[in-house]
Image (cartoon, grey):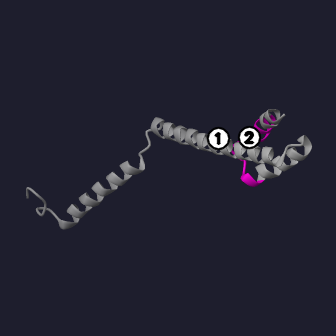
Amino acid sequence: MVDLIKKAFYTGLGFVALTKEKAEELVKDLAAQAKLSEHEGKELVDSMMKQSEQARHDFQSKIDETVLAVVNRLHLATKDEVASLRAKLDELSAKIERGPGTGPGA
């Protein structure tokens, strides 16, 4: 019975949006209807929360991978590349401000 409840819950609600408070509330309702003991209800909440956290982590990883793939496909500069270019630009700007003949090899 508990496995059936778990499967229905996981399918219907989805892991990513599950909060501990919502899971506890849902389990209390299910426990009352399915006549689960307090211990079984607690185990069910713990199991749901672990799987919810794993699903949330997996979802975030997939989003990160997808965004990185899109950035690479579009040939957009990364934050580090922009910072490197900014440093080079600052260096060249400083050389220009100092004027000709003040740099190395002058």
Q: Which mark is residue 33?
A: none
For the point 90% across and 47% down, which residue is it? 32
Looking at the image, do the residues carrying marks 2 and 1 touch, with CB atoms under 8 Å apart? yes
- Report the amino acid beneath label 2: Gly
Q: Residues within 10 Å of mark 1 (few under 14, many from 20)?
A: some
Seen from the viewer's position, the closer of residues 18 and 42 is 42
**Residue wearing tag 1:** 55
In this picture, is 45 found above or below 72? below
Q: Quadrant of residue 63?
A: top right
The mark that comes first in sequence, 2 or 1, is 2
Residue 81: x percent and y percent?
A: 36, 48
Disc 1 residue type (three-letter):
Ala
Q: In the rendered view, does 96 fall on the left or right side of 34?
A: left
SS at badge 2: loop
Task: Please name whichever residue, 52 or 98, is drawn nearer the observer in this view of the structure.
Answer: 52
| Residue plotted at (91% across, 43% down) | 33
For mark 2, what is the residue?
14
Name the element at disc 1.
helix
As measured in the structure, the alpha-carbon distance from the residue carrying label 2 to the one carrying label 1 is 9 Å
Residue extent of the magenta highlight: 8-21
Q: Percent position (x, y) of residue 55?
A: 64, 40
As rendered, which of 95 and 7 lies closer to the eye? 7
Q: Tag 2: Cα neighbours inside 10 Å, few (<14), some, or many (≥20)?
A: few
Seen at 70% across and 42% down, the residue is 47
